Amino acid sequence: MRNPVAVTLADIRSLLGEPRFNWDDPAPWEDLERELGVAFPADFREIVDAYGSVTINGQLYLKHPARHLLHSLSDAMEFDSPAWTLYEMTFGEWLLDYLRGRDVTLCVRGRAPAGPFWEFLP
């Protein structure tokens, strides 16, 4: 089991650069969580609130649940995956490992030779 390390938005920002979305209304998350009967991890919400609906390294897609956005998580939820793998880490720990090029289910090596990047979804 991993030794938990507190990953902060500042850790993610140090690799991705400054976020430009900076959402501060929890209502879209609360509505989606109530609709699905689940709670999203706080660090996932914090990161998606900061960056919004983005693609990272052209490979990882994060979508914000605000329904008025072009790419809303609440409109795009699909549960057709036949299997889930449990990793004993927070989303922030996983994202930080991914951005550092460590093997954590998606391989970033070669996708971002100049370093991690993000861009708003088209």
Image: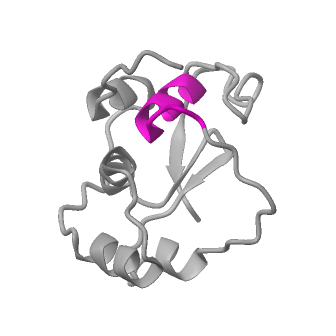
| Above or below 81: residue 97 | above
Residue most toward the left? Answer: 24
Q: Is residue 47 left or right of residue 58?
A: left
Q: Count of labels shown?
A: 0
Prevailing SS of the magenta stretch: helix
3 lies above or below 61: above
Q: Is residue 93 one of those drawn in magenta?
A: yes
The percent position of residue 15, horizontal first and vertical second, equals 43, 24
Give me the residue at 22% from left, 68% from top. Answer: 26
* Start-end of magenta stretch: 87-99
Residue farthest toward the top in the current orientation of the protein: 3
Quadrant in the rendering for residue 99: top right
At horizontal 53% and vertical 32% (from top left) the residue drawn is: 88
Q: Nearer the viewer, residue 118 or 25?
A: 25
Q: Nearer the viewer, residue 76 or 36?
A: 36
Residue at x 47% of width, y 78% of height: 36
Q: Position of residue 96 (x, y in %)?
A: 48, 27
Q: In the figure, 106 relative to 41: above or below?
A: above
- Residue 53 at x, y percent in the picture: 47, 61
Q: Verify whether residue 48 appears in magenta.
A: no
Q: Nearer the viewer, residue 103 or 35?
A: 35
Q: Quadrant of the C terminus?
A: bottom right
Q: Is residue 2 visible?
A: yes
Above/below status of 107 relative to 44? above
Picture quadrant of residue 86:
top right
Q: Position of residue 105 (x, y in %)?
A: 72, 35
Which is more toward the observer, 63 or 38? Answer: 38
